[in-house]
Structure formats: structure tokens, C-alpha cells
């Protein structure tokens, strides 16, 4: 077992109620004793360069546990000196000076969930006013690496380009937009998706010529080569507040509720005590289920993805399939269509850049 990434799902509680959120919120918080037990066992499996991620719910509701985990890891790392990068995904509502100082001290990567000009409609009314000056403040901390994630719904797709341009103009160095998966995208919204991506391509292209930077992660070149495979369980794990280990926080979120389900049995590595005792048996057994989650096992519209020309460029998280009401390996037609449009626009963007250079 080699862990490049370990996520602590520190709480299932959240102080927002975003319109597209699929999470079942509970007042569950990870115990410090669970964190301690996890790192006593898992620290030696972390690769020399690795990520420790804090996720929720709203993880800053469990700031005490985050502080505890960071102290513990720093102490454990005194001898081994692994290159550990901390990351957190947050709605930003609890980011005060104290928290930002702490993130700056420990050189956190901060993924801020912020929907730009749609924030007050899709996330929390009134939060836009708070987040905009907050972004300006975060950008002044030299050791915090800021990225914004914006979710876009089919109903609001017509605002995407405008909203993303607004976030870029705030000076955010990296932005990613993610189409909402819990509502299906009809033909009309897919046409609008294409128009918005075209507008964004023109905007990013002008931006690149001026600054030699691509703030939109969706348009950057893929670092991986070949067919996309979900890394859950393979090089990453998530520890849930109840002490259970899963391959990825998204998979845990989707299947944790129903302990009797087939999926729970397939994808949960069990609780920490059980895993520590029987790791040599449990790990390969569960990992073999995760190994099927690669795109050469996926279908869309009754065709195997392996028959598609875009296979090497296409990325589908298997949990998007589940969230959109599909089977884990079946890509709904509208996700397939969205990906084809994105791949096309990205290709046109790079063609233009290469021709100019
Ligand atoms: S592809 Fe999806 S399920 Fe797999 S590791 Fe990435 S986010 Fe998790
Ligand atoms: S574009 Fe569609 S068919 Fe092609 S690889 Fe992606 S999901 Fe599969």
C-alpha cells in the first residue's frame, strides 16, 4: 500500500445548504483518538511526497481536529521528513485571521467552493458579499495556494462564462468549474454549455497571450497519459468520522449510509481496528473492486468507451455516474456529450496557442 493522498473527512456537518448538495449532513465529527490511531498505522504508508486533505461537510467546523492532526503529523514527520502538502476544501464562511495564519504557516492549498456571481443563488444568500473581500485577503498570504471550484447547474449555465471571468478578474490564480451532476442536462442546456465554453475559450486565449498563464484548470493540458482510471484505493484513501476507511471521500459519501448494500461491501475497507489487524487480507480484496473503475470498463449509450475516439482525453469520475442516477460504470449521455464538447474546445484552444507560438 502506497498512499499518495490521505483525506480526513473531519465532519459531515455543514453550515451551508447549497442547492445541488447531495451530502447527507450529520453532526458527526472525527475524534482525535481516531486521528491518532490512523496516523500511528498509516503514516509509514504515505509516500515521500504526499497530500493530507481535510474535507467535509464544512471541515472548518472541525478546526480543532485539523489543528490536532497537523501537529501530530508534523511531530511524526520530524525524523522522516516527507514532503507533505496539506489541502482543504471549504465554503470559506469560517476563514478568519486565525485560521488563515495557521494555513499560511503550514503552506496549505485552499480549495474554495465559490460560485462567482451565482454564489447567493446556488450557495448561501449574502455570502457573495463576504467571500469577495475574503479572496482579496487570502491572496495576500504568500504561502497559501488558492484555487476556486465553481459548480454550474443546467438552469444557470447561461451565466457560466460571465461568472468565471469575474473570478479570474479577482486575481484567483486557479479556477475549476464542475457541472452539477444531480440534475440531468437537456439538449437546450448542452447547447448553452457549448456556447459558454466557446466564450470562455476566447477569454482564456486572450488572457494567455497577455499573461502566459492559464487560470482555468479545465483548459490546461492533462498531466496523465492514456486512459483515465479512478485512483481511489490505489494511491489514496479517506478516513471517515466513524473511523471507516474508503478509497475516496466521494465513494464514501455515496455508499456509507447503507451498510448492508453490495457497494458498501465492495468499496469500504472497514473500520480502522479491523483494517489494522487484517490489512494484508482486506486491502487486496477491496482494491480489486476499485481496479474496475477505469474508463476502459465504462459504457455510454450502449457503446463501450473503448470504441470512442475521445477515450484518451476523456475523464469521468465514476461517482458522477452514480450521482446522476446511473450505474457506476455507465456514463449518462449528457455527461458524455459535455465531455466531448469540453475536449473539442480545449483542443481548439491549444491549436490556436500552438499556431501562434
Ligand atoms: S475519480 Fe472520482 S471517485 Fe475516483 S478518486 Fe477521483 S474523485 Fe474519487
Ligand atoms: S466521450 Fe463519452 S463515449 Fe467517449 S470516452 Fe468519454 S464518456 Fe466514453
Image (cartoon, helix red, strand yellow):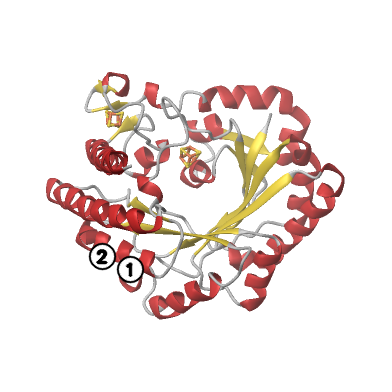
* Quadrant including the C terminus: top left
Task: State whether residue 21 appears in this view.
Answer: no
* Quadrant including the N terminus: top right
Res 196 → quadrant:
bottom left
Residue at figure coordinates x 42%, y 25% from the top left: 226
Q: Secondary structure at mark 2?
A: helix
Q: CA distance from mark 1 to mark 2?
A: 6 Å
Res 128 → quadrant:
bottom left
Q: Are marks 1 and 2 in contact (CB under 8 Å)?
A: yes
**Where residue 345 appears, x then y in whole percent?**
25, 43
Residue at figure coordinates x 37%, y 36% from the top left: 316
Residue at figure coordinates x 83%, y 42% from the top left: 80
Pointer 2 local density, CA inside 10 Å: few below 14, some 14–19, many at least 20: some
Compared across the picture, whether 52 is left or right of 265 comes to right
**Disc on res. 162:** 2
**Where residue 181 appears, x then y in whole percent?**
32, 48
Res 296 → quadrant:
top left
Q: What residue is shown with label 1?
A: 166
Q: Secondary structure at mark 1?
A: helix
**Where residue 120 appears, x then y in whole percent?**
34, 74
**Disc on res. 66:** none
Amino acid at each position: 500500500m502506497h498512499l499518495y493522498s490521505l483525506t480526513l473527512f473531519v465532519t459531515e456537518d455543514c453550515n451551508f445548504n447549497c442547492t445541488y448538495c447531495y451530502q447527507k449532513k450529520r453532526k458527526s465529527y472525527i475524534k482525535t483518538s481516531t486521528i491518532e490511531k490512523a496516523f500511528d498505522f498509516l503514516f509509514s504508508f504515505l509516500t515521500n511526497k504526499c497530500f493530507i486533505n481535510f474535507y467535509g461537510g464544512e471541515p472548518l467546523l472541525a478546526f480543532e481536529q485539523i489543528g490536532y492532526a497537523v501537529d501530530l503529523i508534523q511531530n511524526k514527520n520530524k525524523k522522516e521528513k516527507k514532503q507533505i502538502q496539506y489541502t482543504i476544501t471549504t465554503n470559506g464562511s469560517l476563514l478568519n485571521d486565525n485560521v488563515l495564519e495557521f494555513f499560511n504557516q503550514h503552506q496549505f492549498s485552499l480549495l474554495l467552493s465559490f460560485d462567482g456571481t451565482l454564489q447567493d443563488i446556488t450557495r448561501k444568500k449574502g455570502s457573495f458579499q463576504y467571500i469577495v473581500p475574503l479572496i482579496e485577503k487570502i491572496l495576500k498570504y504568500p504561502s497559501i495556494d488558492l484555487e476556486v471550484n465553481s459548480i454550474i447547474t443546467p438552469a444557470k449555465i447561461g451565466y457560466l462564462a460571465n461568472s468565471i471571468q469575474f473570478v479570474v478578474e479577482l486575481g484567483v490564480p486557479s479556477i475549476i468549474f464542475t457541472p452539477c451532476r444531480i440534475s440531468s442536462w437537456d439538449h437546450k442546456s448542452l447547447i448553452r454549455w457549448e456556447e459558454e465554453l466557446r466564450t470562455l475559450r476566447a477569454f482564456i486565449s486572450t488572457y494567455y497571450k497577455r499573461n502566459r498563464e492559464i487560470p482555468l484548470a479545465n483548459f490546461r493540458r492533462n498531466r496523465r497519459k492514456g486512459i483515465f482510471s479512478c485512483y481511489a484505493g490505489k494511491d489514496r484513501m479517506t478516513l471517515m468520522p466513524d473511523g471507516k476507511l474508503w478509497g475516496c471521500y466521494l465513494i464514501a459519501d455515496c455508499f456509507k449510509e447503507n451498510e448492508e448494500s453490495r457497494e458498501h461491501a465492495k468499496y469500504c475497507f472497514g473500520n480502522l481496528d479491523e483494517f489494522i489487524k487484517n490489512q494484508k487480507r482486506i486491502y487486496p480484496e477491496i482494491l480489486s473492486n476499485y481496479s474496475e473503475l477505469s474508463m476502459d470498463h465504462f459504457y455510454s449509450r450502449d457503446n463501450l468507451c473503448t470504441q470512442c475516439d475521445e477515450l484518451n482525453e476523456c475523464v469521468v469520475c465514476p461517482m458522477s455516474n452514480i450521482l446522476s442516477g446511473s450505474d457506476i460504470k455507465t456514463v449518462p449521455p449528457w455527461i458524455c456529450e459535455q465531455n466531448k464538447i469540453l475536449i473539442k474546445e480545449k483542443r481548439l484552444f491549444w491549436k490556436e496557442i500552438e499556431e501562434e507560438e
